Image (tube, rainbow, N blue to C red):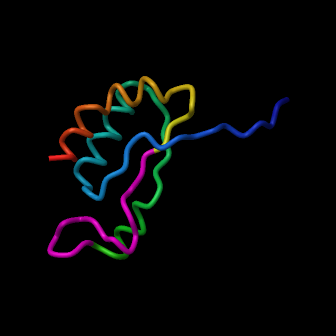
Amino acid sequence: MSHERETYVTVFASGNEALLLVAKSLLESAGIAYLTKGEMIQAIWPGVAGSGFSSLAGPGEIQVRIEDETEARRLLESVEESDQG
């Protein structure tokens, strides 16, 4: 039995909780497993004036297994564009 650790890479980062939810939903619909990083920290230190982003905590991140990276990035392209503008 192999006990190798899987390698995860960050495919999406945002301080916008709504966009994080959309990104997670897209990955779930495609059957891509993911981990989140930093979401609870954002809840502890909320952003200024309801922006949802705290510079103290940094953005929430979504990570996927390295073998799912290409497909995940393709799925999340439109969500990333929404976060840019």
Which image quarter: residue 39? bottom left
Q: For this rendering, which residue is in front, 24 or 15? A: 15
Name the side, left or right, on which 52 lies relative to 37.
Answer: left
Q: Is residue 74 above or below residue 46?
A: above
Q: Main secondary structure of the magenta part?
A: loop
Residue 80: quadrant of the picture: top left
The image quarter in which residue 81 lies: top left
- Tell me if 75 is positioned left or right of 35 in this view: left
Q: Residue furthest right?
A: 1
Q: Is residue 71 above or below residue 6?
A: above
Q: Is residue 61 magenta?
A: yes
| Residue numbers of the magenta segment | 47-62
- Of residues 46 and 28, the one nearer the viewer is 46
In percent of width and height, residue 45 lies at 34, 76
Looking at the image, which residue sits at the far front? 84
Tell which of 36 and 1 is nearer to you. Answer: 36
Position in image of residue 78 (x %, y %) = 22, 32
**Measured along the vertical axis of the image, is residue 4 above or below residue 59?**
above
Asked whether 41 or 9 is in front, the reply is: 9
Looking at the image, which residue is at 42% across and 51% down?
61
Residue shown at 43%/46% (left/top)? 62
Find residue 7 and report its horizontal and vertical position in percent. Answer: 63, 38
Q: Residue at x 42, y 23 (%)?
A: 71
Quadrant in which the N terminus appears: top right
Please give the count of numbered marks on the rendered protein.
0
Q: Residue 60's x, y, as percent?
A: 38, 56
